[in-house]
Image (spheres, grey):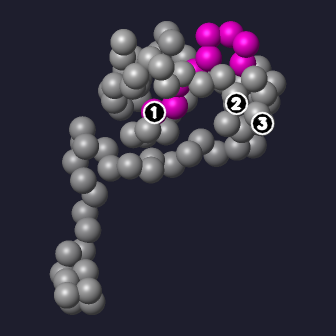
Amino acid sequence: MMVQCPECGEEIDDEAREYDCPFCGYEDYGEGFYECYNCGAIFNWAGDLWECVNCANEGVCLPQRRYNDYNGGIPDVNQGWVGEHYG
C-alpha cells in the first residue's frame, strides 16, 4: 500500500512509517508518521503535517529538500562551468 505526500504528491510505501521523532527522539506510540524522501515533509496517515507531542518540533528547522523534485523539474545548473572545469 502506498501513501501520498500532501506537499509534493510523492508516493511513499506504507511500510516506511516511522515512530521516533527525528527532532528529539521521543517514540510516538500512536499511528506514527511518514517522512517524504522528495521534499522532507513529515506527515501522518491522514495527510496532515505531523507534530511531535513531546517537543512540538520547536526550535528545529524542517529538513530542506534533499532530492530533485522530479515532479516540478530539475534545478538549473551551470553546465558550461562544469564542462570548463571538469572537462
Q: CA distance from mark 2 to mark 3?
A: 6 Å
Specify few, some or many for label 3: CA neighbours under 10 Å numbering under 14, 14-19, or 20 or more. some
Mark 2–mark 3 CB contact (< 8 Å): yes
Residue to which mark 2 is pinned: 21
Residue to which mark 3 is pinned: 24
Q: Is residue 69 above or below residue 75?
A: above
Mark 1–mark 2 CB contact (< 8 Å): no
Instruction: Measuring from the top left, give residue 61's x and y in whole percent.
Output: 64, 45
Q: Which residues are magenta?
A: 28-36
Badge 2 marks a residue whose secondary structure is loop
Magenta stretch encompasses residue 87: no
**Disc 3 residue type?**
Cys
Quadrant for the C terminus in the image: bottom left
Which numbered disc covers residue 36?
1
Q: Earlier in the sequence, mark 1 or mark 2?
A: 2
Q: In the rendered image, which quarter is residue 22 located in?
A: top right
Q: Earlier in the sequence, mark 3 or mark 1?
A: 3
Q: Is residue 84 above or below residue 14?
A: below
Specify few, some or many for label 2: CA neighbours under 10 Å numbering under 14, 14-19, or 20 or more. many
Residue 9 located left or right of residue 57: left
Q: CA distance from mark 1 to mark 2?
A: 14 Å
Q: Residue at x 62, y 10 (%)?
A: 31
Residue 77 located left or right of residue 66: left
As drawn, the residue found furthest toward the right would be 54
Q: Residue at x 54, y 21 (%)?
A: 17
**Disc 2 residue type?**
Cys
Badge 3 marks a residue whose secondary structure is loop
Principal secondary structure, stretch drawn in magenta: loop
Q: In the rendered image, which quarter is residue 6 located in?
A: top left
Quadrant for the N terminus in the image: top left
Mark 3–mark 1 CB contact (< 8 Å): no
Instruction: Measuring from the top left, give residue 84's x and y in whole percent.
Output: 21, 89
